[in-house]
């Protein structure tokens, strides 16, 4: 009899949108997750993104922004507007891909 949890380590594929919420991920996974998300969002054609890291003590925010500073596709980033998370989220603008109109 199966309890529905036969393979709990199997990865779950989530649809790529312009928002990534990091609340449900362990902090140790955040750097790789954010890099993978930037790759997938870029490939999907998103150029304006919002990464929700929460307010807390600012550790996730620093991790996210350090990664963004190092990514050559990132044109700019900053706090989200108050209604979109304020300093608990970071809005990101990516540059156009070669060949984009």
Image (spheres, grey):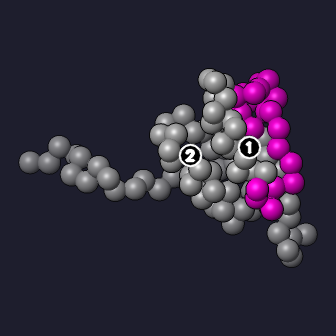
Circle 2 sits on which residue?
A: 30
Q: Which mark is residue 94?
A: none
Q: Position of residue 27 (x, y in %)?
A: 52, 40
Q: Is residue 50 above or below residue 72?
A: above
Binning the other alpha carbons within 10 Å of mark 1 as few (below 14), some (14 to 19) or many (20 upward) gives: some
Q: Position of residue 40 (x, y in %)?
A: 63, 61
Is residue 50 at least partly visible in the picture? no
Asked if residue 49 lies left or right of residue 9, the reply is right
Circle 1 sits on which residue?
A: 65
Q: Residue furthest bottom?
A: 99
Asked if residue 57 lies left or right of residue 78, the reply is left
The reply to whether the magenta stretch includes residue 79 is yes
Quarter of the image where the C terminus is located: bottom right
Label 1, secondary structure: give it: helix
Residues rendered magenta in the picture: 70-90
**Picture quarter containing residue 98?**
bottom right
Label 2, secondary structure: give it: helix
Q: Residue furthest right?
A: 101
Q: Is residue 2 above or below residue 95?
A: above
Name which residue lies at 56% across and 54% down. Answer: 32
Name which residue lies at 86% across and 70% down. Answer: 100
Is residue 1 at least partly visible in the picture? yes
Q: CA distance from mark 2 to mark 1?
A: 12 Å
């Amino acid at each position: 009899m199966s309890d529905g949890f036969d393979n709990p380590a199997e990865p779950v594929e989530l649809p790529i949108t312009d928002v990534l919420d990091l609340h449900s991920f362990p902090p140790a996974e955040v750097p790789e997750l954010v890099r993978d998300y930037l790759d997938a969002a870029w490939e999907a054609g998103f150029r304006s993104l919002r990464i929700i890291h929460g307010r807390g003590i600012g550790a996730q925010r620093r991790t996210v922004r350090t990664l963004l500073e190092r990514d050559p596709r990132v044109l700019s980033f900053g706090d989200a507007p108050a209604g979109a998370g304020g300093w608990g989220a970071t809005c990101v603008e990516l540059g156009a891909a070669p060949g984009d109109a």
